[in-house]
Image (cartoon, grey):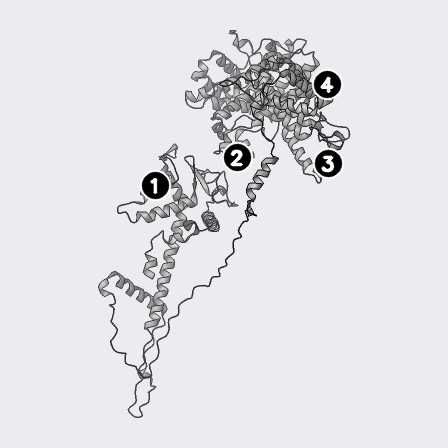
Amino acid sequence: MGSTTANAGPSSGFNNIPAARGSSVEGSRQFLLRLSQFHANRGVPLPPFITGIPIPGYDPNNTPWSFLEPSSEPASFRLAGKDVNILRLFGAVIQHRAMMTSQPGATPRDIWPSITQNFDLPPELPQPVNGVLSTAQQLERIYGYLLQPMEATYNEMMRNMAMQRRAELARQQAGLNVTPIQRNGVSSSDGRPQSSSSNKMPLPSTNGDEATNNLKRKLEEDDGNPKHARQKTEPLDGPAPSVAGSVPLPTPQFKRPARRKIEYVPLAREVETYGGRDLAALEHEYVLSLRRPFRDINSWGLVEIDHLVLSLRSRMSTELSYALTTLNVLSILRARNSTSGFEVKEAPDLIDEVVDLIEDVAFEGYEDLADEEQDILTNRHLIRSVYETETEVFAGLQTDKQGFLNLHADGLKQRPGNVVRCAVNVLKNLAFIPDNVEHLAKNERMLDVLLRLCVLKKPPESSTFAPASRALNMSDLIDLRKDILGFVGAVAPAVVLGSISSPMTCRIARRFWQLSASYLTDPTDSVSPSLYLHSHRIPFNSPRATRPPSNAELALDAFTSLTRLDQNRRVFRQVISGDAMFTLFSSLLRRLPLVDVDFQLVSRETWLAYVERVLMAMYSIAFFSPTAVKKRIVEDRALGYRTVMLRVLERMFLSGSPDARQYYAVATRRAVETVKLIDDVEADPAVGGEENEDQSGVGDKLAFGVGYGEFGDNAEEHGLGMFCVNRDVLLTMLSTTEVCSDEVMFKELESLVRIESNMDPAFVEEVPAQVL
């Protein structure tokens, strides 16, 4: 028995672990718990996504397990784009090792190609990991770090237990042989047994260790040399002679196995039929009867646009439902093998009726008054207020809240908020058709009504903000603001704002600024890319890490498109206050990459496009912001404008090979132009400064678009020398091939290093202190 246990091999004893047997879910859970505790005791706690067990000492920023890619499945990791379950991996290794013993000449490494085929892994990794390209080698390496140490410790424990059982068995066998048969001597005088001590056999020694060692040595010699093994003796034919007065042999004591109580729980049979009828089929048919049938597109037949216009004008509940449903279907239809769809230029009255419907239902004929500039409420603040309101006690029983339908007073009809949202959805779908962009962009009244829906007001009897439209509640407003921002982003490239003297134009500019700033000035999201992923608990190697914040991207797309034209920039300069410009500019500056992890994320196209939009938005604000705002941006020590922009330019200009620098060409050009806009106004007020502003407050730079540098003017660039204390870095940038081949960029960067002689000496002395 002892030799069988000892020769079982390193993996046979480990098969007793529940994970190796795959006995139950509880066994697998116990195995993961033991694995987590084992590595925690070693001082290298496992990540929670491996075992599902959080370890207090685990630090995700300083862990040796960073080479493991997390998986969406529990107790798994990803390798070569596939999920590998550690329980299945361990069972496969044990099985292949057992099969390898029957194959002569096989080595332990021969099992790994077969194991990779079991998990449907490719033979080679998409990208080498630490110089390893073979999937089998990488899987063997992961197994050696993750499961091999615990397996070796368990096998060592099993060998020690086998030796203890052999020693215990040897003691039991020694206890059977050392008790002698005492033969009682017969006295010659009286024939009775003598009790003298001379006739007694000596008792065995009580030194257990010495006897055990001698017996173990004897057993090892017998096992090693078969000639010395004890030969079997045949029993005698006759009965053994009985010895009078012999002492019976002691019965060996064996440990009984622990008693186990087995309980059987009867399984209840699910009743699927009643009276011979299938209940599941009856329930399925009942649900289908309650479901409203889906109308096929052919069921609409020939749609008359004039009839839809009349249905919208009637304001009847059934007619509105039919008209809005039909328009929603028409707005998402696309021609076969083409991106064109329903063209609104063929039905000019239809769009006007939809806008009238939105205005009548949402505002009930109230005039639009000029709203004053107020504090910007971020989108996160609105969501939090809705959550706090809806989680109050008996919040669902309140029927007098704004935007809810009172059945007793209004009767059976559609909720006004649903009508407004459906009509806005129609306009948004039509805006994504390229043929409709120009026509919709010319309708300034439509843009004014849609942006009016996004306005918040503060009722006198309440301390919280509410939608300006009485037909909307806060949940409707959050969804509408996002839809309207997408609509503006779609038509913004063709939007040209009117004259500054028009109140409608001023309202559009102010409300659009507040709408876009509510998504871009949120302090939680106004951080660098790596901090954004860290704050939202998104792993860097997960698929979600490749996507920038969607709301910020939507707002940046709309903002950069609408502020692209000089006419629109002139309107924003007159309408928006300097504090609002500085707040938005500082929020955009904090979104730029700073550390190495940020630039690793920016190496992906999605994040690079996001950074380019941020730089374009900063360029637009710097373009139309007044001189006081630019001075505030430069002199704000907490903002660190010089340091951040220099860091961005340094990493993008000096990012290694020329191909890598070409990857950042658009971003670097936009960053240099942004820095130059801030620096030009400080250095030379005659170029777009306050001294050369006309009556409207707009200087020459706004009058000549992006400036004289792009129209063949080879005049010398003037500047304040913003980066004069960082000449070494700027000179290295100037020596790159990309800058030397671009004459305009070379002059702009060179002016950022040079300090003009006509500058105030006192200001020049303060420059190093401000930068450092």
Q: CA distance from mark 3 to mark 4?
A: 32 Å
Badge nearest the viewer, 1 or 4: 1
At label 3, counting other C-alpha atoms closer than 10 Å, the crowd grade (few under 14, some 14-19, many 20 or more) is: few
Residue 370's disc is: 4
Q: Who's the residue at 37% across and 73% down the image?
A: 251
The correct choice, above or below, for 93 with respect to 763 in the image is: below
Residue 58: image location, x then y, percent: 50, 43
Q: On the image, numbered disc 1 is attached to which residue?
A: 114
Please say whether residue 172 is one of the residues in the magenta stretch. Answer: no
- For the record, the magenta segment spans 458-465
Q: Earlier in the sequence, mark 1 or mark 4?
A: 1
Q: Earlier in the sequence, mark 2 or mark 3?
A: 3
Badge nearest the viewer, 1 or 2: 1
**350 horizontally vs 530: left or right:** right
Residue 124: image location, x then y, percent: 36, 34
Please say whether residue 464 is one of the residues in the magenta stretch. Answer: yes
C-beta proximity under 8 Å, tags 2 and 3: no
Residue 619: image location, x then y, percent: 57, 18
**45 horizontally vs 181: left or right:** right
Q: Who's the residue at 32% across and 56% down the image?
A: 7
Residue found at the very far bottom of the displayed protein: 189
**337 horizontally vs 459: left or right:** left
Q: Who's the residue at 39% across and 37% down the image?
A: 120
**Main SS class of the magenta portion in the image:** loop
The correct choice, above or below, for 407 with respect to 45 in the image is: above
Q: CA distance from mark 1 to mark 4?
A: 74 Å
Q: Earlier in the sequence, mark 1 or mark 2?
A: 1
The C terminus appears in which quarter of the rendering? Answer: top right
